[in-house]
Amino acid sequence: MNTQPIIQLNHISAAYEKKRVLENVDLTVYEKDFLGVIGPNGGGKTTLMKIILGLLAPESGELHFYHNGLEVKEISMGYLPQYSNIDKKFPISVYEVVLSGLNKEKSLFRPFSKEQHEQVRQVIARMGLEGLEKRAIGQLSGGQLQRALLGRALVSDPQVVILDEPNTYIDKRFEAKLYKLLEEINKERAIILVSHDIGTVLQNVKSIACVNGTLDYHPDTEIPAEWLEEHFGCPIELLGHGNLPHRVLKCHHHE
Ligand code: ADP
């Protein structure tokens, strides 16, 4: 993996009103990284993403961005929101959704350029959505909607894409297809993948951040089962699955 950092968080703390959610978090994301962000519900994963995306100001700490080894004010980021945050009734077509990913680069009073429309067509083809350009997002399957939104996140050619719980769009049958696509995307840019699905994440990412108020970073996916159990409060079992170790929750009952 490339060792040039692109995002660096130093001693970041975050709170809503008086409630502290993240405490003294350090994290470095590298070029072409594939970082999995896991942790229990309410642990602060989405809050961490909001800070990286600049949607929430940290209470304290520093956030730095780098491009080719030099510190810059910002880097380009694409974002795939959680399924539950999408208004499926919003009357917008697949083409318009992908095009909206270029809004930031459009000059205010000028229409999109020929080149920008060409970029949109290329992304639509890459996402396997040709023929569906005019379809309203409310009439797409979960997988098609996800690919349209992934197209929106990618069309501006960002340095990093952030995916918040992408498995909520699709059922298990399509998961392998999604990860194949992410593997391709990862050849060109870093990916940050937020998920509570530990097993799938560990099989696909290069490094892991476990977030539960604080953050534990693992430069690879060799996380001790004891750590996972302690932080998730659930017993986790390691299973052989093809060539890859596979972690699942053991049968258990919460108190
Ligand atoms: P995760 O993504 O790991 O489930 P979140 O970052 O969404 O965790 O939430 C962390 C904590 O912050 C939770 O206790 C949640 O209730 C709280 N929280 C999240 N967003 C807000 C908000 N806008 N206002 C107040 N509390 C919030």
Image (tube, rainbow, N blue to C red):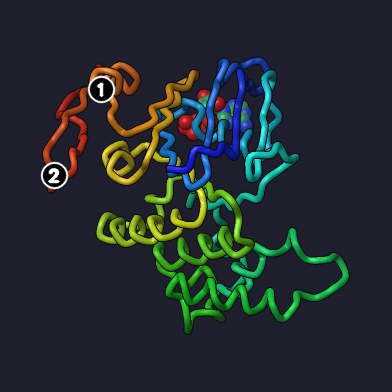
Image quarter where ligand 1 lies = top right
Determine whether the beta carbon of the residue marked 2 sits less than 8 angstroms from the nearest atom of ligand 1. no
* Residue at left offset 60%, top offset 74%: 120
- Local crowd size for mark 2, using a 10 Å CA cut-off: few (<14), some (14–19), many (≥20): few
Q: Which mark is residue 97?
A: none
Query: Is 107 left or right of 189, judged from the image as shown?
Result: right
Residue extending farthest to the bottom is: 131
Residue pictured at 63% horizontal, 45% vertical: 68
The spot of residue 160 in percent (x, y) is 56, 49
Q: Identify the residue under disc 1.
A: 224
Residue 144, placed above or below residue 226 = below
Q: Secondary structure at mark 1?
A: loop
| Horizontal and vertical percent position of residue 76 | 65, 50
Q: Nearer the viewer, residue 2 or 65?
A: 2
Determine whether 154 is above or below 190 in the image: below
Residues at marks 1 and 2 touching, judged by CB atoms closer than 8 Å: no
Residue ID for mark 2: 241
Find residue 1 and report its image quarter. top left
Percent x, y for residue 186? 44, 53
In the rendered view, does 199 fall on the left or right side of 88? left
Q: At 69% from the left edge and 18% from the top edge, which residue is drawn?
A: 60
User: The residue under label 2 is which amino acid type?
Assistant: His
Q: Secondary structure at mark 2?
A: strand
